[in-house]
Image (cartoon, rainbow, N blue to C red):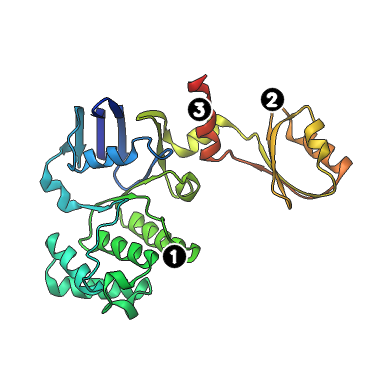
Amino acid sequence: MPNTVQLENVSKSYDHFVAVDALSLEIRAGSVYGLLGPNGAGKTSTIRMMIGITVPDSGAIRLFGEAFTRSHLARVGYLPEERGLYKRMKLLDQLVFLAELKGVPAADATRKAASWCQRLELDAWMGKKIEELSKGMQQKVQFIATLLHDPELLILDEPFAGLDPANVVALKDVLLEQKQAGKTILFSTHRMDQVERLCDSICLIDHGKAVLQGDLKQIKGKFGRHDVQLEYEGEDNFLGDAELVQSFNNYGNYVEVRLKPGADPQDLLRLAVSRARVNKFELMEPSLEAIFLEVVGKRDA
């Protein structure tokens, strides 16, 4: 498949602060892509250049196989990190207005907006002003507005912020449907745990630079399986004594263990069984957050 988004050595500075530093990435059509990293890493600055809000100091941006022009925005749905709703406008009127700005006829916009509101449990609030809604409800309104013109590319900056677990699941289900329909989805977030299960490919950035990118499964495969989740009854002092344990985090009812390179997980299992009652022993892939910290630690060193 062709690339929906392509950035080539894109840089952006504000006075003496380098927000994005020679960043290159490619997002395949029909894929889910994660632009991940801590707050201040340059994710939002990258997105703003991607859709023409700001202009890069250097480098090239291509959307849908062409050099970026503002006409491409009709094919893009953008959920910004900073929400932009009219507080005194009624919910349904707001959605219809935003859809009309994207070229959707009023009658179609009204029908689609009402349908989405019903699905995301906002139908009882359609006549209410935005300022009367909770932050989570406002987030769902903005999410619906992102979809109403049926965009080919969805760009979602911190999409799950302010949502409870049930609404996170509801939005996740919608996004999976969008992927199945062939849409391209870009997530930008500092909460790596929220999107790593959804992404096909990722780019981890830090201080405006890409520190790791590519196919998510291949990346995790390169880092191996050195993490163990262990549930047990008894004392945990054997973990500190064990030569094969690099570090561990105890959460009370279970512990996450990072093994030293080359250590055999079976040795840890034998040690645990000899010292405690083991209820669960699971070899796990490293999380993206753990991978990121390892990569950034090596760069800083």
Can residue 1 be spotted in the picture? no
Say the numbered circle drawn on residue 259.
Answer: none
Residue type highlighted by circle 2: Gly
Q: Earlier in the sequence, mark 1 or mark 2?
A: 1
Residue named by callout 2: 262
Question: Residue at the spot x=13%, y=61% of the render?
Answer: 101
Foreground disc of the pair 1, 2? 1
Q: Earlier in the sequence, mark 1 or mark 3?
A: 1
Residue named by callout 3: 295
Residue type highlighted by circle 3: Val
The spot of residue 114 in percent (x, y) is 26, 75
Dot 2 lies on which element?
loop
Picture quadrant where residue 126 is located: bottom left
Dot 1 lies on which element?
helix
Q: Nearer the viewer, residue 87 or 269?
A: 87
Mark 1 burial class by Cα count in 10 Å: few <14, some 14-19, many 20+ = some
Q: Is residue 180 above or below residue 200?
A: below
The spot of residue 196 in percent (x, y) is 47, 46
